[in-house]
Image (spheres, rainbow, N blue to C red):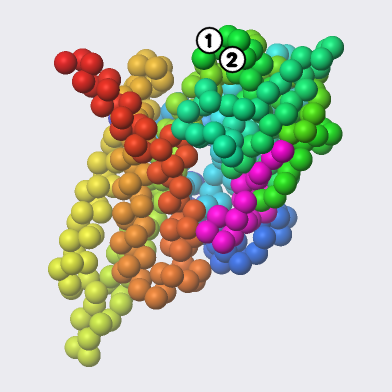
Amino acid sequence: MDFMISDRIQTIVEMINEFMEKEIIPLEPEFLVKDFKDLLPILREKQAMVKKMELWAPNFPVECGGMGLSLLEHGLVSEALGRSPLGHYVFWCQAPDAGNVEILHLYGTREQKQRYLNPLVKGDIRSCFAMTEVDMPGSNPVMLETTAVKEGDDYVINGHKWYTTAADGADFAIVMAVTNPDASTYLQASMIIVPTATKGFNRVRNIPVMGHEGSDYSSHAEILFESCRVPQKNLLGPEGQGFVIAQDRLGPGRIHHCMRWLGICQRAFDLMCIRANERVISPSGKTLGTRQTIQNWIAESAAELQAARLLTLNSAWQIDKNGASQARDSISMIKFVVANTMNKIVDRALQVHGGLGMTDDTILAYFFRHERAARIYDGADEVHKTSLAKRILKAY
């Protein structure tokens, strides 16, 4: 295992950290009280600055217009960006676009790349990914009710999706739908590109998450497909290969999430330590940091964060060297380890902040609201633990 950080990446991370402190984190008070769409003008200004710094799209291939960082290198960058909810968006490596870029690059036709991939990498358009369904278990992507039936030269799509992140304002969706119902379980579904302006693509609502429905990129939509007709040339990859493509997308996608969560861990940890040192709790001037319980939380959080970081970097290194399939066990481990580490550290930081932590005067309440879902999406903790345990036991 070689986690050596090159001088180039070290410089890039330092530049990003400085930019985050000066340009991005100061925007958070507005972000917490305004609609995301109201921030777009200032965010586009920041994105223009990122492009001038030549730090745009760090994880996208060079031939597409990105920096072409390896997964391990991107892990270090992503942690720096993850300290703010705005970081990945401003540097243009945000989900779900990051995953869509990967599969368009791997499976898209020349025409699809020209129409969808190139403008997506440039930041001219956004996209969304419609897989999760209202009445089907989200942790099992082979269980789908949405269908795409051939009629003439078209697919006609009918189905009901939700938690389609960033559909509000997206130019197109990549939709998982059953095209081959009589095939074997893992060969029934396909991925199809659907422009959101297509008749029959109906965004029902932005789903309120802990009371906040959000807008534009910062939202999760419920989508109803009603006789939504698109050309068969919009098929992404071979027909019936939707599950295979989904695994190519979701494996690295889980790594991306963990990298971002590490940034949240670090931000929450920093805020907790600052608060512990500053919050006076007695007439003699003693602070929260003098209390053993707080000291235990800080020590435990520091150790847990470092362990989660090293486990994630190791997983990224394995994928870079041997591919996602060979790192399957490690990916399952980090999915539930890092998600739980993040939730624990955010909860401790909020507790140390007391009543202040419950307000939107810090970023902690936002993290608490929106990152609890980390233990659910891209496979619930329990699913990953069960799958991992079965593979481990099989070896014995």
Q: Position of residue 230 (x, y in %)?
A: 80, 23
Between 315 and 330, the residue placed more toward the observer is: 330
Q: Position of residue 184 (x, y in %)?
A: 53, 10
- Determine whether 83 is above or below 149 in the image: below
Q: Position of residue 335 (x, y in %)?
A: 37, 36
Q: Dot 1, how many residues are within 10 Å of its Cα: few (below 14), some (14-19), or many (20+)?
A: few
Q: Does the magenta run of residues contain 185?
A: no
Between 305 and 208, the residue placed more toward the observer is: 208
Q: Secondary structure at mark 2?
A: loop
- Determine whether 165 is above or below 119 in the image: below
Residue under label 2, please give it. 188
Residue 32 placement: quadrant: bottom right
Q: Amino acid at mark 1?
A: Ser
Residue under label 1, please give it. 184
Q: Amino acid at mark 2?
A: Gln
Q: Secondary structure at mark 1?
A: loop
Screen quadrant of the C terminus:
top left
What is the distance, in whole Å, between disc 1 and disc 2 at their CAs? 6 Å
